[in-house]
Amino acid sequence: GQNIDQPTEMTATEGAIVQINCTYQTSGFNGLFWYQQHAGEAPTFLSYNVLDGLEEKGRFSSFLSRSKGYSYLLLKELQMKDSASYLCAVQDSNYQLIWGAGTKLIIKP
Amino acid sequence: NAGVTQTPKFRVLKTGQSMTLLCAQDMNHEYMYWYRQDPGMGLRLIHYSVGEGTTAKGEVPDGYNVSRLKKQNFLLGLESAAPSQTSVYFCASSWTSGSAGELFFGEGSRLTVL
């Protein structure tokens, strides 16, 4: 079966760095997405990786290793507004998105 | 620019009642999707459409029907609601289903079935 695993919850301190991991087992691979979802709101797109390596976008970076079935989202200089759930999703061979359950990130002052 | 708009935002139904959720997008996207989101689970695809007049089943289609009569609208219907359909429903749209097919989501519709 297809599976996306990510930690349920993480806690970090304002101003610090946090890494949210995502491992996947899917039927084929056509890309990996990270979305941010604030409580009670819709998911919004953060990043997309299809090749191995690191993609940097401001305070957020996303890394992919296809051979290991592994990705992480790195958030730097954490701000209180970064408190949200972070969703990992993989496109399988049919370009269908398989979603992880999300990681709830709690930022403490 | 409204993006993706869902109506209604909240609804309470009794078991056996029917209802329709409306999704409208103004980005001229070809692809539209209906997802449900339940606690502790990833988003699950109910139905999707790759263009006007087309629909296809997703991962959890049972108990739902959809229609895409106009490119900008995607309707999700529940013919006979059940408590198991209590969930938050998200509509989304995208340019493509291929690589870099970023999804744009509506604000969600919270449905409770008693």
Image (cartoon, coloured by chain):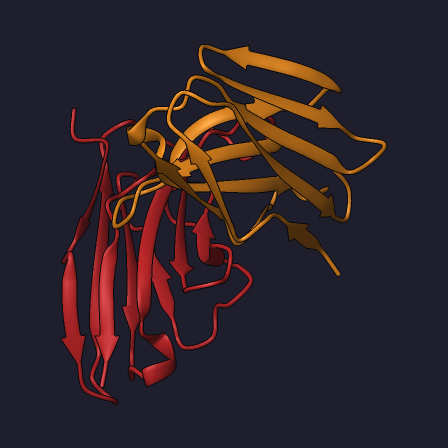
- Residue at 53% of width from left, 59% of height from top? B58
Residue B71 at x, y percent in the picture: 30, 39
- Residue at 46% of width from left, 23% of height from top? A16
- Residue at 71% of width from left, 56% of height from top? A2
- Residue at 45% of width from left, 58% of height from top? B47
| Residue farthest toward the right in the current orientation of the protein | A67
Q: Is residue A39 above or below residue B78?
A: above
Among the 4 quarters of the image, the one containing residue A106: top left
Residue A18 at x, y percent in the picture: 53, 29
Classify residue A10 as left or right of residue B75. Answer: right
Residue B57 at x, y percent in the picture: 52, 61
Q: Is residue A68 above or below residue B13?
A: above
Among the 4 quarters of the image, the one containing residue B81: bottom left
Relative depth, front residue between B63 and B51: B63
**What is the drawing colour of chain A?**
orange
Count of numbered circles in the view: 0
Residue A85 at x, y percent in the picture: 41, 43
Relative depth, front residue between A95 and B37: B37
Question: Would residue B55 be seen by someone viewing this image from the given angle?
Answer: no
Quadrant showing the C terminus of chain B: bottom left
Q: Is residue B54 above or below residue B95?
A: below
**What is the drawing colour of chain B?**
red
Relative depth, front residue between A24 and B98: A24
| Residue farthest toward the front in the current orientation of the protein | A109
Question: Would residue B53 be seen by someone viewing this image from the given angle?
Answer: yes
